[in-house]
Amino acid sequence: MKRAGGLAVLLGVVVAACGTPTLSPGPGGFVTVAAVRPPGGEPGFFEPIHRARLIGVDGSVAASWELPEVAMPVPVQPGLYRLEVYTVFLGDTVECVADPAAPGGSRCSQPTLGPAQVCTLDIGVVAGQLTRATFHVLRDGLCGLESGDDLDAT
C-alpha cells in the first residue's frame, strides 16, 4: 500500500514537472455543428462540401469532419478549442494518375477548390455535455458562425 502511494506521488511530480495538460482526462463531451443554407439552396456551378475542425490550444487538430445534412454529435475530450467551419467546392473534372499499387492501376480524384471564407469560434467542451454551433452558408462564399449559447439567447 505504501508503495502505491509513493507511485501516485511520483506520478503527480512528473505531471507537475511536465506542465498542466490542456485537455482534461476522463469522459468526453460532444460538439455538433448545424449548417443553415440560404433560401433556394446553394446556387453555383461547383458542388459545395461543408467541413469543420476543432483546433486545440496547442495547435493540433483534435477532430475534423464533413458536416452531414443533419447535425451529428462528434465526440471530443473536454477542453478549449477553436472551431473552424468552411466550405470547399468539388471541381467539375476527375483527375487520374497511374498507380500500379491501386486497383485497376490508377488513382482518381475530384479536385477541390477553396476553401471559401473560414469562420471561427472559440468554444469550450464540457464532459458529458453537448456544445452546439450553427454555420450559416451565405452567398458568394461568405459564412457566419454562432454558438448554441447565442442561439438560446434569442
Image (cartoon, rainbow, N blue to C red):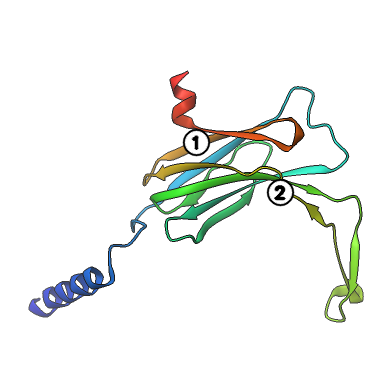
Q: Position of residue 154 (x, y in %)?
A: 48, 18
Q: Residues within 10 Å of mark 2 (few under 14, many from 20)?
A: some
Residue in the image at 84% along x and 75% along y: 102
Mark 2, residue position: 115
Q: Which residue is mark 1?
A: 132
Q: Residue at x 33, y 56 (%)?
A: 24
Answer with left or right where residue 2 lies relative to residue 96.
left
- In percent of the image, x 47 and y 27: which residue is there? 150
Residue flagged by tag 2: what amino acid is it? Pro
> How packed is label 1: few (under 14 Cα within 10 Å), some, or many (20 or more)?
many
Is 23 on the left-hand or right-hand side of 31?
A: left
Task: Give the answer, above or below, for where 52 lies relative to 18.
Answer: above
Residue 124 is left or right of residue 61, and the answer is left
Give whichever of 9, 103 is nearer the camera.
9
Residue 1 is drawn in which quadrant?
bottom left
Mark 2 or mark 1: name the one nearer the start of the chain: 2
Measured as percent of width and height from the top left, residue 127 is found at 36, 47
Q: Is residue 24 above or below residue 3?
A: above
Instruction: Describe the element under mark 2 as helix, strand or loop.
Output: loop
Nearest the viewer among 38 and 120 is: 120
Q: CA distance from mark 2 to mark 1?
A: 22 Å
Where's residue 21, x and y in %? Answer: 32, 62
Q: Report x, y in % for residue 153.
A: 44, 21
